[in-house]
Image (cartoon, rainbow, N blue to C red):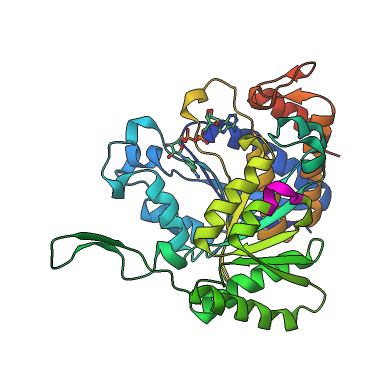
Amino acid sequence: MATTYQIAVLAGDGIGPEIMAVTLDILAAAGRPSDVVFEYTSGLIGGSAYEATGHPLPPEILDLCRKSDAVLLGAVGGFQWDTLPSHLRPEQALLGLRSGLGLFANLRPARIFPQLVGASSLKPEVVEGVDLLVVRELTGGIYFGQPKGIFADEQGQRRGVNTMVYSEAEVERIGRVAFEAARLRRKQLCSVDKANVLEVSQLWRSVITRLADDYPDVELTHLYVDNAAMQLIRWPKQFDVIVTGNLFGDILSDEAAMLTGSIGMLPSASLGAAGPGVFEPVHGSAPDIAGQDKANPIAQVLSAAMMARYGCQQPEVADRMERAVLRVLEQGYRTGDIMAPGMTAVGCTGMGKALLTALD
Ligand code: NAD
């Protein structure tokens, strides 16, 4: 009997609908050999939802997501909505999804495809073979800590204040996600903090160290964030899984992403304690190329593969999709963002067809 998953499909704005259309076909086809069926229910989010309903994340869409097994998201945003008040801007929908679904863990893999080594700004010998995962805490730390604001003191001098705060429970739950993720990979976890200066990091380090007792098969190391930033550029191959707080993770995950050289190849997952996760490309809605069949759908396809792996526990389906990506790159198909001399130029739909053919 087939195993069925209910997927909330939120294509969003800009290139979202193009890359999503390609991805849904590939996901369906990748499920078939494993007798896995993904049932799609589409909804509006971001600017397109604002146009239709006056809100970037209508309540019924959040309900749809809550009732689904996983959420596959495209991208939101566009110039035409840039002047809206901040609570109505498309990007607000992403924050609403995160808080509405309790998504506290953000997983961002950075993997160098052998065929795209030349796209990195680093030397081939430095980036060849890089395959790492940044696990970032998403709902705590300095972005949310109180007090925050710009206050005037008695002399009328303004002071900007943010507070970096983590509770033991918050560190423990992100720590467990990271240890579990390391178990599915090469079993090495590097925790990144600033424990030489920050008390909040000293607590972070002590909790992560205690958790390691529960994961004796995972090798745990610690790095200060300034050193981690250097090591990512100097010798990125040393990393398997990196776990860190919200602020450090924001910066390090972008740094790690750029090792690969192309934003059109990078997927991400945001997970909560229970309930559906959200799986989406790292890139935005690319309004400059929307509707022109120029977008690279691979980040979206790899996001669907992450959904199969982490959201539906169907690693075979994920492997099948990831192998197809490797194959089309091997065959020389390239969208504009990853084009190189001697390769075959394709658009978004052309890349989709090549991926479908390449599925085993
Ligand atoms: P962007 O990621 O949309 O685009 C940056 C550059 O990369 C552009 O030149 C674009 O053409 C290119 N690009 C991005 N994805 C591509 C792909 N799949 N294939 C080929 N080229 C690709 O970032 P931006 O231009 O800063 O933002 C555009 C809009 O997207 C803004 O409204 C922004 O707020 C929004 N945004 C949304 C998300 C999200 O939905 N998660 C993330 C970042 C930005």
| The C terminus lies in quadrant | top right
Tell me the residue at 38%/50% (across/down).
92
From where the camera sits, is residue 267 visible?
no
Tell me the residue at 73%/66% (across/down).
189
Determine whether 340 is above or below 20 in the image.
above
Percent from the top left, x then y, of residue 174? Answer: 59, 70
- Count the numbered circles shown: 0
Determine whether 325 is above or below 319 in the image.
above
Q: Is residue 157 magenta?
A: no
Query: Is 1 on the left or on the right of 152, as rendered?
Result: right
Closer to the camera, 28 or 217? 217
Percent from the top left, x then y, of residue 76? Answer: 45, 40
Location of residue 322 by image quarter: top right
From where the camera sits, is residue 105 visible?
yes
Q: Main secondary structure of the magenta part?
A: helix
Query: Is 90 on the left or on the right of 39, as rendered?
Result: left
- Outermost residue on the left side: it is 155
| The N terminus lies in quadrant | bottom right
Magenta residues (range): 231-236
Closer to the camera, 337 or 74? 337
Determine whether 213 is above or below 139 in the image.
below
Q: Is residue 232 magenta?
A: yes
Tell me the residue at 82%/61% (across/down).
186
Location of residue 202 by image quarter: bottom right
Query: Is 213 on the left or on the right of 195, as rendered?
Result: right
Location of residue 243 by image quarter: bottom right
Percent from the top left, x then y, of residue 162? Answer: 35, 64
